[in-house]
Amino acid sequence: ILVCRPEEVKRITGIVRSDCPPLQSCLSEDKNGMTHAIMEVVAGGIVQTASDIHRYVRCTLLNSTKSFDDVVKSAQDSLRWLCHKRFVEWNNDTKIYSTTPLGRASFGSSLNPEESLVVLDDLSRAREGFVLASDLHLVYLVTPINVEVEPDWELYYERFMQLSSLEQ
């Protein structure tokens, strides 16, 4: 039974009779899908133990298309990578995975772990450029960007020339 307007019958029957492309799990794409998924479930508190990992991967589309052992190996590889890059920590005493501040930042930003590392690298390089020897950097931080004020350039130049070379 098809319920639609008469002018839509041909188009809708064409859609119903057409072939569907095969389903593929996004977890199998270059390991990034699995890594992002594992990061999300650990940071979200869904997965904490090794048995939680097994239970989680059993519920994936990837598990229905690949062998369970392959899926578990992929999840374990992702966990190792996340631990190595310090997104996730394993506590030997409690036998629990937990997220680090980097992992929580990645989770909160909705960036995948690879993208998070790029952002972290950019922020680290930017932080190196800040000169914190004086409080002058605070002027930059509190100066509003949307206020149109024309400075007195002569006074600005005089004050600039009075700064030490480090402050300049």
Image: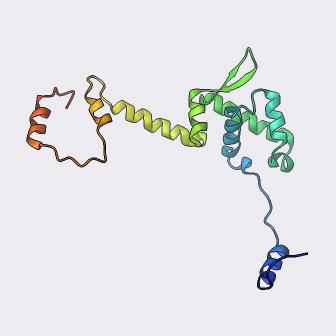
Give the side of residue 114 with respect to residue 91, left or right.
Answer: left
- Kindly indicate the quadrant of the structure image that contains residue 4: bottom right
In the image, 10 versus 7, the foreground residue is 7
Residue at image x 83%, y 43%? 59
In the displayed structure, 29 sits above or below 20; it is above
Say which residue appears at 76% left-offset and 52% top-offset: 25
78 horizontally vs 111: left or right: right
> Residue furthest toward the right?
1
Residue located at (60% from left, 28% from top): 86
Left or right: where does residue 154 sit relative to residue 49? left
Instruction: Identify the image quadrant of residue 114.
Output: top right
Q: Foreground residue, 135 or 61?
A: 135
Q: Position of residue 79 (x, y in %)?
A: 70, 32
Image point (38%, 35%), residue name? 126
Spot occupied by residue 15 in the image (x, y as percentages of width and height): 80, 75
Q: Quadrant of the C terminus?
A: top left
